[in-house]
Amino acid sequence: MSLEPPELLAPAGNWDCVRAAVANGADAVFFGLPRFNARMRADNFSEADLPEVVRFCHRAGVRAYVTFNTLVFTGELDAAAETLRLLSRSGVDAIIVQDVGLVRLAGHIVPDLRIHASTQMTLTSPEGVRFAGALGVKRVVLGREVSLRELERFDMEAGGVPLEVFVHGALCVAYSGQCLTSESLGQRSANRGECAQACRMPYELLVDGVKKDLGDKRYLLSPQDLAAVDHIPDLIRAGVVSFKIEGRLKSPEYVAAVCQVYRKAIDAALEGAPAKASAEDRYQLEMSFSRGLFHGWMEGVDHQSLVPARFGKKRGPFVGRLQKVGKDYVELESALPLKPGDGVVFDTGGDTNAEQGGRIYEIRGRQLFFQHGLIQFSRLKLGDRVWKTDDPALNKRLQQSYAGTITPRKRTPVRLQLGGSAGGSLWVEALSTSGVLMARAESQLPLQEARNAPLTCERLAEHLGRFSDAPYALAALETQFEGPVILPISELNRLRRSLVDALEVQARPVRLERPDRWQSLLTLETSLKTPERPALTLLCRTTDQLLTAVEAGVGRVYLDFEDVRRYKEAVEQVRALSGQTEVWLATPRIQKAGEQGFFRLIGNALPDGVLVRNLGALDFFSGAESGGSLRLAGDFSLNVANPLTAQEFLGRGLETVTVSYDLTLEQVLDLARGLPEGLLGGVELTLHQHMPMFHMEHCVFAAFMSEGRSFLDCGRPCEKHSVHLRDRVGMAHPLRADAGCRNTLFNAVPQTGAQYFEALTQAGICTFRVELLEEDGAETKRLICAYQGLLAGERDGTSLWREFRAQSQLGVTRGTLATKEE
């Protein structure tokens, strides 16, 4: 467990947010630059801003972290390297990284710059954290889905990688780093900071083809916001080193409000007097931004509470229900104090984009009046909920908290030694309390002999010890003057500023920087066998699909069954039918603490290989516990977007890696061109699939088809019904549950890269995958034959594309490989 007190880490989308965080108790802030950050819609900071932001934070005794938390494409690696050098020179305390290849690049060219693994790296288990530590990561930001009980299984003693957790803010319904919805539906990748927030949209639930009546529940994938303030003592006991607040798109008032509440909670817990958040604190949190406050997954899954499903946008604290709707007013019994100028919204249970609301103009008893014409009272009805959305008085108080000069909460004590004689400079040295010289400065004007009122220790302490917004405090002052001397006060003040500048220079780290280009890291330690001709692999999700694949002579089949206990029988079945088809078993896409049993079931089934879908699985199957004897392939969920990431995984025991689904055709070709020829045989590309969009801990089956809070009492409707979610444009997307009860929502429309097959093979890619979902035996056979013909040169990609479009009821798209122009 860390001996340092835990860190409060605040978001900063602009300068006012930085000031709000620093002024209200943050120990560190995180922010992004215009490129390579997962909040592209935030204001962010320019490269020119960077040194001043870091300097401001450090003068206040606050650490500055920069987000580098997106996938990096091959054509961007040169720019990424230059950005890394800039960050290191600017004195940034750490970078927050998603891309495994970028971790490798940073570790080589700026080895002294600390690397924190972003939650976008999808680290949810001790095995995954151990893998990240082996990469050189110094801190891991865990997935929001990790519970307190699961945290107890992480090794935070004896050199374990320190852990950071989110404690407040918006909850993504999908696992961070694993959401492909925006990419699939609109080529706006969440792994590139362009999330379109499809989870906040309304959906209809189709059960066995029939719409289920859920009343006013329409926002089936929109969780409440996380508020773990009451769990701060538990997290401290668990050894968590950093408490992170989400919100780089939020206002400075939000940053100030949330920092105030969590600073108070952390300090109270450290002082041994923990207390639950007061009603005033919760009001402040709800007013700052809230879709409802919930402890998230801190206490494990609670499928009846996480997603109320009535709205997907900001609400605030609950005021009450309408008791009367007049011609130009509404009447209600308010649970909160209201005043003119406050904002409210009327929740009618309908489309939240067309809801009524505004600022209160006048209050008469229980009657609220609004500006004439602002509210369409005819659209309101008795019983509608009312929420408070704005409190100008609270906003003003929060704004005042970061106005003016901000003094550091923590100061470093320094001893000042001064000396000089008339006609010479006044010199001053700053020493640590242990006597180590930290900095030195001299006056520009000479000392003069004092006829009266010479410089005294008291006077010098008053002017030289007034550090104001610099993070230092005067511990002692000693003088060594040769006779009585004097110096103008203005020069003393200038000398103090010069000394502070010297202290800052001394405190700035001197870091190693290598000029190497990223290509120099692509050493060819092992050469992979390249197939003599293009090879087809098939991912099957049903026994019918599997048997059809074996009959068709597919060389390698990946099995992705919802129940991993069926794997052993399936492997034996294939072996009895054919000696030509290899059977590889897919791991769950997510592994959490205590779920190694899934891996053991896979290993005990004795497959030909394992399709690895998370870093914990790679650590497990390449380690001593599994014997390290199974052949391994990496799936798309490892987010391979550039040659450095590909080589890192291939060098750690994977025979192949699947290209990330975030790449267009040209970006795939760039990746292939960037790899040494001996590694091209290790690249696999999914040519046909229904894109897996959301992958969630949230279980739609349990939440809306049962009264159960977990798999223990939900009755497992996922095993009894076919379920789809219909979006606003009428597409019904298939929903599936996996072995860990996690849900995946697949795109209803299949995508094919058949048109690009020739370009891909010319680039040296030789292994192509077709993924099945709901296809029956006949459809499976048709797809296999079509792609076998394509790979054998008997069919061309364009005609195959046209054939698929003509035969599919929903059509087929070129998917994420296509450029936006196509």
Image (cartoon, rainbow, N blue to C red):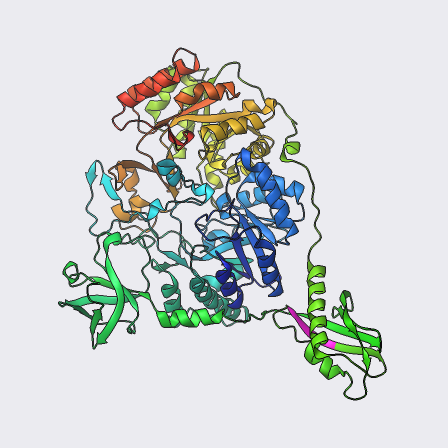
Q: Which residues are magenta?
A: 471-476
- Relative placement, left or right, of 604 versus 472 is left
The image position of residue 248, as x and y in percent, is 46, 55
Q: Is residue 475 magenta?
A: yes
Residue 723, quarter of picture: top left
Work out which residue is located at the far right of the displayed protein and give it.
482
Q: Which residue is nearer to you in this view: 439 or 646? A: 439
The image position of residue 321, as x and y in percent, is 21, 66
- Relative placement, left or right, of 699 versus 487 is left
Residue 389, quarter of picture: bottom left
Q: Main secondary structure of the magenta part?
A: strand
Q: Which residue is nearer to you in this view: 15 or 575? A: 15
**Residue located 38% across and 19% down the image:** 549
- Relative placement, left or right, of 159 versus 613 is right
Residue 808, quarter of picture: top left
The image position of residue 469, as x and y in percent, is 61, 70
The image position of residue 14, as x and y in percent, is 49, 57
In what quadrant of the picture does the N terminus appear? Answer: bottom right
- Up the image or down, 383 lies above or below 188; here it is below
**Residue located 84% across and 73% down the image:** 424
How many labels were placed on the picture? 0
Question: Do we see residue 86 in this rendering?
Answer: yes
Q: Is residue 448 magenta?
A: no
- Relative placement, left or right, of 590 versus 438 is left
Question: Do we see residue 784 in this rendering?
Answer: no
In what quadrant of the picture does the C terminus appear? Answer: top left
Work out which residue is located at the far top of the displayed protein and give it.
794
